[in-house]
Image (cartoon, rainbow, N blue to C red):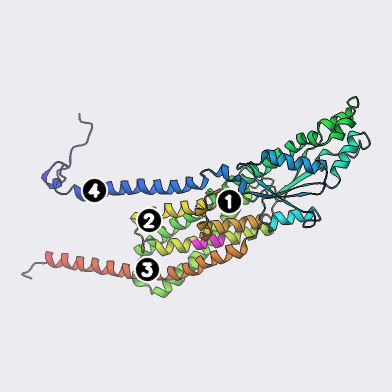
Amino acid sequence: MSLFPPRDSSRTPFRSPYWSQRWPQFIIPVAMVGIILQLLFLANMSYLYGVLFKSGSRAQALKVLAVDYDGAEIGKSLSLAYQALESKTFPSLEYRSISEYPDPDLLQEAVCKGGYWGAIYTHSDASTRLMDAIQGENKTNYDPRKLISYIFNGVYYPVITSSIIDPGMKALVSAASRMYYRVANEARLAVNLSDPVSSNVFLNPIEASSIDITPTSQGSRVLFNTVSMVMPILMQFFFSMAMNGIFTDTGVFTNLSKRDIYVIRLIISKVYTLLCAIGMSGYIWAFRENWSVSRGQFFETWMCLWFYMEVNYLIVDSILDVVVDIKFFAFFLLTWIILNVASTIWPFELSAGFYRWSYALPAHNTWTLLMTIWSGGCKSQNEVALPVLFGWWVVGHTTSAWAVRRRCLLSESMDEAKTLEIDGSASVMKDPEQ
């Protein structure tokens, strides 16, 4: 008994004379598509991997503000510690004078509104309080965590802050604690090793204390600027493809007026993208764990994502079927997704300068808006992000209207071609004697 079903008599085998002349018509195009896909994925993934290429050696581009309010041994220890750790793989400290930042509260504002990834400072009279504790004169009020503090914004590229900024500042404070013994000669002479309090203070003089402007420790934070930037694009593609198919099958593109089609699609797109945005905001909030965000921030997130959904819908609607055929649209879609995700997964400071062109992409500007919303206004780049997104939105509405007209004309021409084909077949089948 054969494992294969019997061959259909109406079909011819591949080795028959019929196919000997025709196989290049489908084998060569399939081979070309395979080669093009290999090149496409190679180019896209090379671009994406290039974002992260040698990023560790660019950590020095991450600037941290440093102010010495102590002006004594603790401040010197911090400076020596940075000199020991300074390298391409460590954030760079920019020292500023007390006259520029007379109050430590101004440092948080500098992190929020300036170009700093964080700030580190020594507390006023820190060396004096430490010396008093070593001499046994301040046993109750001494706290090693109130000598050096650092500030950072946990929601601003959460992976970077949790893997480079926060650990880097902890390592710096730990190094400063060791450097203290090199500069504090009086402390070595004053310590009373028989006194457990004095010896404990001397052996553990400095501990790090941190101020996280927006603590973002939930596991889902790694998805904010990665997978979450992909889903809106896919949602608009699937919906546009389905809607175009329905409109074509029901004759809408052929029979309904072009103006009415545009208005109907415009209304549908607004409602659909609004629902997409609230759905995405919903699952971000549902898995926020202990993330401290308010109802107002939920609404702002919803509106920001609605804007992003709208832009991507307009882009897909303007290109699908009218500029790029559905058979090859996956080529464009993959590239569009990779370009946008590459603009959000890593800060430009850690990538090659070439990637800064991505300031013009919708995903990057949406991500900067979301970070500003979630941190209560910190790191605001609205003066760049909003005009860029609005530009995409305005141009997208214009091209979307053109795409509707184009689809209608294509449907009309296809309908006329089918009518002529049917008429031709009917005339051939008609009996000439009748």
Q: Sequence order check: which comes first, mark 2 or mark 1?
A: 2
Residue that badge 4 annotates: 28
Residue 430 inside the magenta-drawn segment = no
Residue that badge 2 annotates: 329
State the quadrant of the N terminus.
top left
**Real-space Cα separation, disc 3 to disc 4, in angstroms:** 37 Å
Q: Is residue 144 visible?
A: yes
Most foreground residue, 419 or 216: 216
**Real-space Cα separation, disc 1 to disc 4, in angstroms:** 45 Å
Q: Residue at x 56, y 50 (%)?
A: 225
Tell me the SS state at disc 3. Answer: helix
Q: Amino acid at mark 3?
A: Val
**Real-space Cα separation, disc 2 to disc 4, in angstroms:** 20 Å
Magenta region: 305-311
Q: Is residue 231 visible?
A: no
Q: Is residue 262 above or below residue 352?
A: below
Where residue 285 appears, x then y in whole percent?
Answer: 63, 51
State the quadrant of the C terminus.
bottom left
Most foreground residue, 422 or 391: 391
| Tag of residue 349 | 1
Quarter of image, res 209? top right
Residue that badge 3 annotates: 252
Where residue 118 appears, x then y in whole percent?
Answer: 69, 49
Are the residues tagged 1 and 4 within 8 Å (C-beta)?
no
Q: Sequence order check: which comes first, mark 2 or mark 4?
A: 4
Crowdedness near tag 1: few (<14), some (14–19) or many (≥20) residues, C-alpha within 10 Å: some
